[in-house]
Amino acid sequence: DWGSHGAGDDTETLTPIIAWGSGIPSSQHSNVHIEQADICPLMSYFLGLDYSINSVGRLPINYLVPVDEAILQAYIQNAR
């Protein structure tokens, strides 16, 4: 069956992401499901960049330190 693009099984479509560093809770060792599109707003947040106007991803706040004013503002900006 050459030329196919896969079956769409979880083993073919799930992508692990490991995040660490400043701004990420160090005690969090849980599996959190996010969509691949959510990586763009997450990286934009950490790099201090504006979110892409065409991004369909949502900022995964469970990867961030406890909610403060900066995170709330980032979440609101991402929703626009």
Image (cartoon, helix red, strand yellow):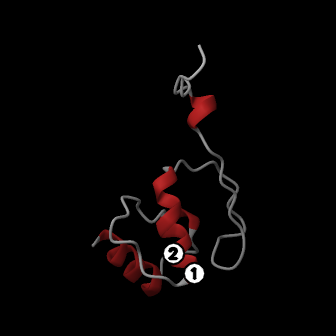
Instruction: Tell me where residue 65 appears, x and y as whole percent.
Output: 58, 74
Residue 32 x, y percent position in the rendering: 57, 50
- In this view, the residue in front, 2 or 47, is 2
Circle 2 Cα neighbour tier, 10 Å, few/some/many (<14 / 14–19 / ≥20) = some
Q: Quadrant of the N terminus?
A: top right
Pick out the residue farthest to the left: 80
Depicted 13 relative to depicted 27: above or below: above
- Residue at 65% of width from left, 54% of height from top? 17
Q: Are marks 2 and 1 in contact (CB under 8 Å)?
A: yes
Which residue in the protein does label 2 denote?
44
Specify few, some or many for label 1: CA neighbours under 10 Å numbering under 14, 14-19, or 20 or more: few
Position of residue 13 relative to residue 31, above or below, is above
Residue situated furthest top in the rendering: 1
**Quarter of the rendering containing residue 11:** top right
Q: Which mark is residue 74?
A: none
Say what secondary structure mark 2 lies in: helix
In the visual, does 25 lie left or right of 32? Answer: right
Residue with the mark numbered 1: 47
On the rendered structure, is 51 left or right of 76? right
Which residue type does callout 2 highlight?
A: Ser
Left or right of 44: which side holds 54?
left
Relative to the observer, which residue lies in front, 31 or 39? 39
**Quadrant assignment, res 2:** top right
